[in-house]
Amino acid sequence: MFLDTLRTISAKWTGSLAISVVLLAVLTGGLACRGQSSGESNATTRDGSELLQRARAIVLEIGPAVLNRNANEAGSGDPGTIPPVDAELLIEARELLEILLADPRQHAEEAWRLAGIVAVQENDPDLAAYAYHALTKGEPSPQREGRPDELLPALSDMPIATALGSIPGQHDAFLNLYDQVTEGDIASAAELAERYLSGSGVPRNKRAALHWLNIAADEGHAEAMFRLGDLLGKGPDRPSTESIRWYKKAAEKDHPEALYRLGMYEAKKNEFSSRAIKYFRRAAESGHAESMHQIGIHYGDGTGVSEDRAASTEWFQRAVDAGSVEALNALGTAYIGGKGVEKDVKKGFDLFMRGAELGNPNSMYNVGVSYRMGYGVERDDEKAISWLLKAANAGHESAKKALSKLGHPWEEPN
């Protein structure tokens, strides 16, 4: 079933050379060519060897031009002696590199050096860092001002003996996952996608990540469904139609974060809709802290449910117990105002302080206000200004206004 899915999905990606190469490697068992005759295996190896020979030739042809260009930009070269970089050859290099890096088992010293040259020429720091990481067994990539300017000289000076066979441990782990996918392990396909997203063991490749997530999701992997929802939108607060579709599929499997995202989507679409509460409740049953917090907010405001201050405070407490930092501020506000719970300004301040120390801007602001007004703590203007400043630096607009009123106009940090 799983390999059938691999084959089905591959048909959707025939327009992508890189992904086709990945699928070819998976379906045939990689360069080792498990189960094939020796003749077939030798043919595959020979093809890979020809690719690497071409990579080596391109390195020798365009490497000096790229190196001289970087030397000139650093102020140590003569502009009149820099040979131009052949644009068509560079395009060929990028296409060749895409093939070599698409099949993890093709990775070799020539591929890493080609990656370094292309990265420097096209100012691609991710590719540069990855190439250097592979050739140095994980040493930090030398960069200046966020650019890979110093990478190529470092690669050029590196002894061949050091480079050969130096694929890092992360890549080995990636290959192990690759093998597990061929054996039908759905979870490994999802993890493979995460490695493509993070650049762990392979260069970052969102398209490849989406490919493997689709495979895992079509096999019923809830986390893969959720991740597809995330990646196909414009952020957690701006889901697309496709995002919602995948969140709903994940929600059918009771994925807590997908349920929460759907609840937030419904609340934003219609704050009085009871659908949001239903999603939040299902997520809360799995211990999702922020869903508990949202239920507390809805009970407090009477949106989607009848207003119930006691129930609101109870849900805030449950959210705090489950680890919600936002709920610390909400619960503190309830105690300060005596809403749904017996008024206790000292306890309210203590909750604000817990949230502030955990980096919550709203709690930082409320600590500052509490020190300024003497709510639950002895009044202290110096501490009030200090906490308001922390909140303002974290982007809290009310804190910025409060500082101005106190004669301490907030300025953007350098």
Image (spheres, rainbow, N blue to C red):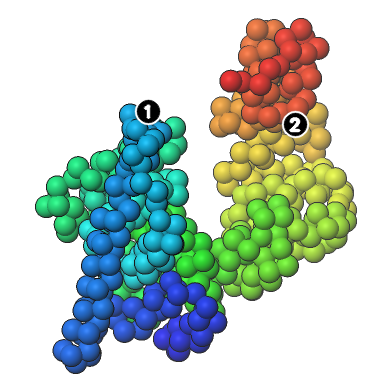
Residue nearest the observer in this picture, 280 or 102: 102
Tell me the kind of residue under disc 2: Thr
Q: Nearer the viewer, mark 2 or mark 1?
A: 1
Label 1 sits on a secondary structure element that is loop
Tell me the kind of residue under disc 1: Gly
Residue bearing mark 1: 75
Residue 22 found in image quarter = bottom left
Residue 67 found in image quarter = top left
Q: Residue at x 14, y 52 (%)?
A: 160
Q: Position of residue 66 (x, y in %)?
A: 35, 46
Q: Residue at x 59, y 61 (%)?
A: 231
Residue nearest the observer in this picture, 203 or 230: 203
Q: Position of residue 158 (x, y in %)?
A: 18, 45
Residue nearest the observer in this picture, 198 or 335: 198
Q: Residue at x 77, y 25 (%)?
A: 398
In the drawing, does residue 252 fall left or right of residue 158? Answer: right
Q: Which mark is residue 333?
A: 2
| Above or below 309: residue 231 | below
Q: Position of residue 388 (x, y in %)?
A: 68, 19
Residue 351 found in image quarter = top right
Q: Residue at x 32, y 64 (%)?
A: 174
